[in-house]
Image: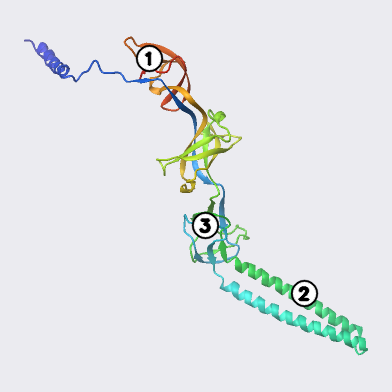
Amino acid sequence: MSSPVRSAIGWLLPFAWLLACGAVDETAEIPTASAKMERIERIVVATGTIEPEREVEVRSRIAGIVEKIHVEDGDRVEPGQPLVEIERELLEAQVREAAAALEAVRVELRFAKIALERSLELERSGAASQQKRDDARSRQQGARAEVARAQARLDNLNTQLSYATVRSPLAGRVLQIHTEEGNAVSPVTAVTGGIVLLSLAGTEALYLEGLVDENEIARVAVGQRARVQTEAFPERSFEGSVRTIAPMGQRIQNVTYFEVKIEIVDPDAELLLPRMSGDADIITETVESALVIPETALRYRGANLYVEIDGPAPEERRIEIGIVDGSRVQVLSGLAEGETVRLK
C-alpha cells in the first residue's frame, strides 16, 4: 500500500471512531424559546456617584491651637454637637480681666451718681454753683459710657470664648478631618478664609449625580422611578426618583452628556456613603403585558429584523420590536404568543 493511502486511512480511522462513540452529534438540538406575555421596562442608565444634599467645610471663628477633636471620619453628628476644642486659657484670662474692668467702671458710675445728687442738693441750697452741677453730670455720663464699653468688650470676649468649642451646624456625617490636635488654626475672618478643620455631609437626603447620554436624555423626566445600584452593595438596589435634569449638556471625549440628580428615597439609604460609585436604572417606560422573546432570537439583515420560527420546516419571519431591556425584546408585530423561535 502506498504511503499516501496509508496516511489517508490513518486520518479517517480516528474520525470514524468518534462518530461511532457519538462525539460528533449531527442531530444536536437547537436552543429555542417561546414568545410570552411579560412585564418589560425601558431603562436609561445614569452613571455617577452618591452625593449629599449639602456639604459643609467647618472652620474656626477664632485663632488658636487645636486642643481636642471629638469625632472621627464617618461619625454621625447632630446640630450643635461639639466637634473640635480650641485652646481657651488665654481667652478665659481675657474674660476675667474684662469682667474686672467692668466692675471697676460700675463702681465709678455709682460714685458719679452720688456726686451728682450731692451737687444738686448743694445747688438748691445755694452752696454750690451750676458749673459744679454740670461737671458732676458730665462725670456721670462719662462713667455710664465706660460701663457700656466695658460690657461690650466682655460680651465680645464671651462670644469668642464660646467659639472655642466648634459645633456641628447640621445633622450629618463626618466626611474627613483635615487637622490634628496641636495644630495652629487661623480664623475664618483671615484673608485666606481660615483653616478647614473638617468637612461634613448633610444626611437630610442623598443623591446619585449621574450622566446620561444625549441620545437617551429625551426619554428622562422629573419624577420617574429609578433603581440605584452600587459596587458596595452588589446584591441589592435602592429606590430613587429623578429630581433634576441639567438644562445644558457637557462635552466629554466628544460625547455630550446631561447630568441627572436622582434622590434616593429608599428606607435603607443610610447604608450608602458619599462618593460611592453607582448606576441608576431610570424607568422611562413600562409595559405590563408585552410579547417578549430573548434578544438572542433576533436575526439582522440590513435595517430589518427577523426571527426563525422553529418547526419541521423552519420559517424566517420579519418582526418589529419595541422595548429592549438587555436580555429581552418586546415584539410589536410579526409574532404571536406561544410561537417558538430559535436562538443563536
For the point 22% across and 18% down, the residue is 25
Assess disc 2: are there few (<14), some (14-19) or many (≥20) residues with their C-alpha within 10 Å of its C-alpha. Answer: some
Q: Nearer the viewer, residue 6 or 226?
A: 226
Please provide percent x and percent y for residue 201.
53, 51
Q: Is residue 83 left or right of residue 336?
A: right
Q: Mark 2 or mark 1, which is nearer to you?
A: 1
Above-or-below relation of 264 to 167: above
- Pointer 3 with pointer 2, Cβ within 8 A: no
Query: In which image quadrant can residue 192 be found?
Result: bottom right
Above-or-below relation of 157 to 195: below
SS for callout 3: strand
Q: Nearer the viewer, residue 308 or 336?
A: 336
Q: Quarter of the image for the N terminus: give it.
A: top left
Q: Quarter of the image for the C terminus: give it.
A: top left
For the point 42% across and 40% down, the residue is 236
Q: Residue furthest right?
A: 126
Residue 158 shows in this picture: yes
Q: Is residue 192 left or right of residue 296?
A: right
Identify the amino acid type marked 2.
Ala
Q: Is residue 7 left or right of residue 189?
A: left
Please provide percent x and percent y for residue 148.
74, 73
For the point 56% across and 53% down, the residue is 56
Please provide percent x and percent y for residue 233.
41, 43
Assess disc 3: are there few (<14), some (14-19) or many (≥20) residues with their C-alpha within 10 Å of its C-alpha. Answer: many
Residue 77: which numbered mark, if any? 3
Identify the amino acid type marked 3.
Val
Query: In which image quadrant can residue 81 be found?
Result: bottom right
Identify the amino acid type marked 1.
Glu
Measured Cα–Cα span from mark 3 to mark 2: 44 Å
Residue linked to disc 2: 145
Between disc 3 and disc 1, whose residue precedes? 3
